[in-house]
Image: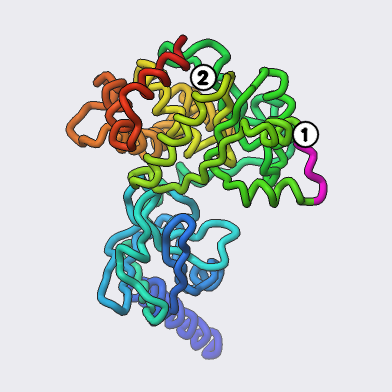
Amino acid sequence: MKTKITALLLTAVMICAALASCASGGPSAVKEVSLIHEPEFGGVYIKLTIDEFNSKGYEYGDSVNVTFSNGYTLEDIPYYNGYYTATGELLLIAYPGYDYIKAAINNSADLWLVAGLSEEDTADIELNERGKYLRIQNARDISYKDERELYTSDEEFANFRSIDAGSIKKDFIYRSASPCDNQHKRATFVNDLAKAAGIACILDLADTDQKIAGYISAEGFSCDWFLSVYEKGNAIPIGLNMNFSSDEFRMKIADGLTEMISKDGPYLIHCTEGKDRTGFVCMLIEALAGATYEEIVADYMKTYENYYGITEEKDKERYDVIIENVLDPMIGVLIGDVYVDIRTEPLEPYAKEFLLNAGMTEDVITELVAKITG
């Protein structure tokens, strides 16, 4: 009997100690972790693998504080497993496939440069608030499959469609996943669909000539339609980054569209998935052609229906969160004025101003509008 009572007391003590530890400490802070600059999309790798960091008790949706050894601090930023913050907002991300967790400013300036970091600097991370951003984490934590048989059509699988918002000519501008980068097994399907649609020119937002050379030389490359268009000089790779608000982003779009309209249509616009960079450029073109906010939303969210089955009717919470946190900030970058109601204000003047600020002339803008609207 005495032994049983002693065992029960020991168990109770252990439970109380565990509860006290959780209540007082939560996840353990990490100290003096070395850093690596990630320049392609702009960010700071903190040299802990995702598993190492999560094993310390951190969970997706938590709010964390990051302090760099040079004194630069990031307070109350979300920890996500995807780029779920709005454009220009900070996050700590554990993106699947990354070697380490990464701190970044989403679709914006390079945090490494903003924070003035060097290879000698380190980072400390601590919990700010458990689960503060869990609603957005749950709404945005979505993935898609790369098997064609799981989709109802080639068009859905390839995220391939024509844009018909505003006064854009019917079947003249198309958008899709990549017709040359086959990492998601969609390139050959895009090839067949684009060939059937009579596409004459490609605006490639994701790649450079160097990247394309790598795709072409890879074993098993079979995108013959893309290759023929590329070899004729009718594929325009502009290698956009994800910094929607940068001068470089604007200028590359203006240069790409200027070159595009120097060639005959129909046109295909794509990045890797045909989602965000493609979404921004198509939103710009749609606004230029007088599209309403509702038309832009309908086209952008078609991608989420194709890839994830998300519609307003089936999954309104996720649908609304994506618009609020992804598309609306994109339109906000186009507008450049937080006091403008993007849902009711005509967007065409702002699209023209965006291109003027990017270096496109009034005459070229007029030519672009004429070309896409007929």
Amino acid type of the residue tagged 1 in the rendering: Asp
For disc 1, the marked residue is 224
Check if residue 323 falls in the magenta segment: no
On the image, which quarter does residue 228 sit in?
A: top right
Residue designated by label 2 = 163
Q: Nearer the viewer, residue 52 or 355?
A: 355
Identify which residue is drawn at 79% across, 39% down.
222
Which span is picked out in magenta?
A: 219-224
Q: Nearer the viewer, mark 1 or mark 2?
A: 1
- In three-dimensional space, the C-alpha distance between marks 1 and 2, rounded to whole angstroms, equals 25 Å
- Furthest toward the left, the residue is 339
Please name the amino acid that badge 2 sits on: Ile
Q: Regarding mark 1 in the picture, which secondary structure is present there? A: helix
In the rendered image, which quarter is residue 333 located in?
Answer: top left
Disc 1 or 2, which lies upstream in sequence? 2
Number of other residues with Cα within 10 Å of mark 2, as a class: few under 14, some 14 to 19, many 20 or more: many
